[in-house]
Amino acid sequence: MKRLTCKPQPDKETSILIGAGIRTHLEEELRNIGADGTVVALVDAAVRTSHPEVVSDSWRCIELPGGEACKTFTVLEDVLRQMAQWRLDRGTVLVAIGGGTIGDLGGLVATLFLRGIDLVQVPTTLLAMLDSSVGGKTAINIEEGKNLVGSFWPPRVMLADVEFAQSLPREQLLSGLAEAIKMGIGFNRELFELLETHRDAILDGDTDLLTKVVAMAVQDKIDTVESDPLETTGRRQCLNLGHTLAHALEALGDFKMLHGHAVAQGLHFCLGVAVDRDLLANDDAQRCHALLEAYGFRREPLPPAQDLAPFFARDKKMSQGQLHFVVPTAIGACRTDACAPDSFAFS
């Protein structure tokens, strides 16, 4: 088991556990943070069915279908009203158990209910372990775009049991691995090479390798988040490598496209942008394209530019008419590049 700590703000600290079979540590971790009041589990209904042991009989429980459809004002209000009807106090701890959408919604619930209650994240998809459960970003979607309504609310504990990943459908496992590839391309050459060298074993769900992949990616995210907690200096924006196009594709497709698959297309795209702007050597770009394709992410034709451009213009990295687009500059490094949102060639 790996134990890491993320401290994005002086008064906010997240204890992070990563390993196989560690969901049995959840109640102990709740005691460690002083959870002696009511515990509410916000849980993906499918996870509750397949892993009933993860929700204690002593907790209150709200089951929801996972997926982007749960990240709406309607669902947010329903959850908050249910908690209000239970007459909970500020000693309540909310445990979000599921994929990234449950985690995003749960985080926003925790920051809003009674102006803030403690949050514990138990991601059950590889994607959520690598990405959304660390760093404190919470969000729901609106018609104008993905994750445009949210806040920063770091969890007290994040517990990533990689055994959950072994039972994921193949497409869900790949979706998470796209985020791992993103971290390799943009932040960690050693992780990139690990993904290159051990592809077959990783795809077979080897828990030792998955633990190592998650721990390496999460440590890089911790370092980035701690250097720019509220995304004010531009460094944390780099975690959105591949995401500008990904979020546009997801919104354009009514959020039916798996996030990791959209990110993979975004990575292919930003590699091309970087080469075109002489920011990345073509040999490095080709090696990155090859890694994506080795995990099944071929470059797909993109929708027309006029369909994508409005989403680029509403991207959260827009400032004073300029989009701070994230581009790789070498394997294991990236930066933002300011440009007009209508300056991209999508063909």
Image (spheres, rainbow, N blue to C red):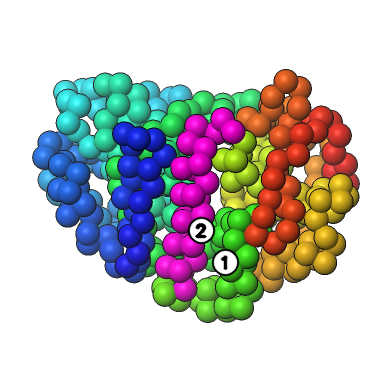
The secondary structure making up most of the magenta span is: helix
Give the left or right position of residue 163, taking residue 150 as reference: left
Instruction: Count up the numbered dots.
Output: 2
Asked which quadrant contains residue 39, the reply is: top left
Q: Which mark is residue 217?
A: 2
Please provide percent x and percent y for residue 61: 24, 41
What element does badge 2 sit on? helix
Which residue occupies the foreground of this view, 267 or 75? Answer: 267
Give the left or right position of residue 39, taking residue 256 as reference: left
- Measured Cα–Cα span from mark 2 to mark 1: 8 Å
Residue at image point 78% right, 58% down? 299
Is residue 337 within the magenta segment? no
Please provide percent x and percent y for residue 28: 17, 54
Give the left or right position of residue 86, taking residue 308 as reference: left
Magenta highlight range: 209-233
Is residue 216 within the magenta segment? yes
Please provide percent x and percent y for residue 107: 38, 35
Please provide percent x and percent y for residue 94: 27, 38
Residue at image point 39% right, 47% down? 6
Do the residues bearing badges 2 and 1 touch, measured as CB atoms within 8 Å?
yes
What element does badge 1 sit on? helix
Which residue occupies the foreground of this view, 100 or 61? Answer: 100
Which residue occupies the foreground of this view, 161 or 52? Answer: 161
The residue identified by callout 1 is 191
Q: Height in image: 311 above or below 244?
A: above
Q: Residues within 10 Å of mark 2 (few under 14, many from 20)?
A: many
Residue at image point 17% right, 31% down? 91
Amino acid carrying mark 1 in the image: Leu
Amino acid carrying mark 2 in the image: Ala
